Amino acid sequence: MTTQEHDDPGDASSPTRPGPRVLVVGAGIAGLAVVRALRGWDARIEVVDREAAPHGVGAGIFLPGNAVRALRALALDDAVVERAVRIERQRIADHRGRVLFELDTSSLWPDDVPTLATSRTTVHAALLDDLGDAVVRWGTSPVTMVRDGPGVDVTFTDGTSGRYDLVIGADGAHSAVRRLVFGDVGLRATGVRAWRLVMPRRSTEPVWSVRLGRGTSFLTIPVGEDLDYCYLDVTDAGAGGRPGGPGTTLAEVAARFDDTVRATTDGAVVKHTGPLEEVSLGYWSRGRVLLVGDAAHATPPSLAQGAAMALEDAIVLGELLRVTPSIPTALREYERRRRPRVDRVQQQTRQRDRTRGLHPAARNLLLRTAGPRLFRANYRGLGARA
């Protein structure tokens, strides 16, 4: 076994020791945002990712105002904004395309913060573009983690090992860090299967548009001059309670809508498909190991808050580590500060999904009469700084 020799761990506040050694597990949006947010802390950062190389995971990404504000805080907004579409309206319709309500995105976010849509690859590439002194080791993931007082001993799949002052699990809903340190806890199936697709752009309107069927939804968002991102899902109940049975293929679910949706899905490229899951934990840190992003609080995409929460996690963590005398104290303060906001996002996501799951007649009546008010309530409080 090849062993990496690491210096003795120590807090950032100690002038007699080198900067803390930090391991970030996961080189997705959450992990790379952490790397960027930790600048100025004088930490030595190593990133590992199970994938063999960077790749364009997912398809499109919708960035509400709080996500755009977080990009600005990380000095990433220019790299993303110049390639993004500014979404001006959100439109909700029934399965036939009859509009239930519309609202301007400017009414949801204060201070003229735009709402954007782009490819997920654009955001990921912007984060990868400038990692400072951090090193990414691709095709590597942790095998064991042993917490030993002031340090965390980690062995990896490539045979190396090392001791770290802080380990950050940013490795998604199926987090290896969570499994190794917290156990098989927190992950829950939502009973929804989703397809993410891309296709040539069909409209010049800068509109986020969703159609709601019985146990199904179909979303389209322009994410570039020539590209639309499409999202289609179905609940287990909407599929007759038989996952994988009739009604759970892309074509069969699309057939519940009109010819426009069927034609869209016929001509689209499927980028990803699978069940939606949620992660809910009573705590996100144990000693010097912390979970961030989807590893800590994965949420279905109904509010489009996954990337926003991950970016905010990174910003708050960076702020606290720079000013707090000890790492464990910073992690406790991080959770105290982040927990209410994340809990609200998960609660509002569940509430929106419950509304969507109503009988179509009741749901459509509710959205016609109270849709804008419900949407504003979903995002209430998120316009403020994280």
Image (spheres, helix red, strand yellow):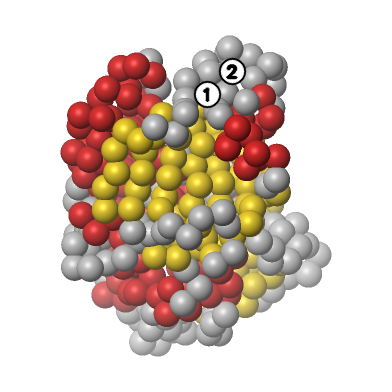
Dot 2 falls on a residue whose secondary structure is loop
Instruction: Name the foreground residue: 71 vs 83.
Output: 83
State the image coordinates of residue 128 (x, y, percent, origin top left): 58, 75
- Residue in the foreground of this view, choosing between 52 and 267: 267
Q: Residue furthest bottom?
A: 16
Q: Which residue is nearer to you in this view: 217 or 59?
A: 217
Cα separation, mark 2 vs mark 1, equals 6 Å
Is residue 367 visible in this depiction of the protein?
Answer: yes
Q: Secondary structure at mark 1?
A: strand
Where is residue 35 shown, x and y percent of the image? 48, 72
Whole-percent x, y for residue 206 in the image: 41, 59
Q: Are marks 2 and 1 in contact (CB under 8 Å)?
A: yes
Asked if residue 256 is positioned above or below residue 219 in the image, the reply reads above
Residue carrying label 1:
235
Q: Residue 128 vs residue 137: left or right?
A: left
Above or below 332: residue 9: below
Which amino acid, by three-letter code, is at mark 1?
Answer: Thr
Residue at 31% over, 65% down: 114
Q: Residues within 10 Å of mark 1 (few under 14, many from 20)?
A: many
Q: Quadrant of the C terminus?
A: bottom left
| Location of mark 2 (residue) | 239
Q: Amino acid at mark 2?
A: Ala
Left or right relative to 362: residue 182: right
Residue lying at 26% horizontally and 47% vertically, measured from the top left: 103
Quarter occupied by the N terminus: bottom right
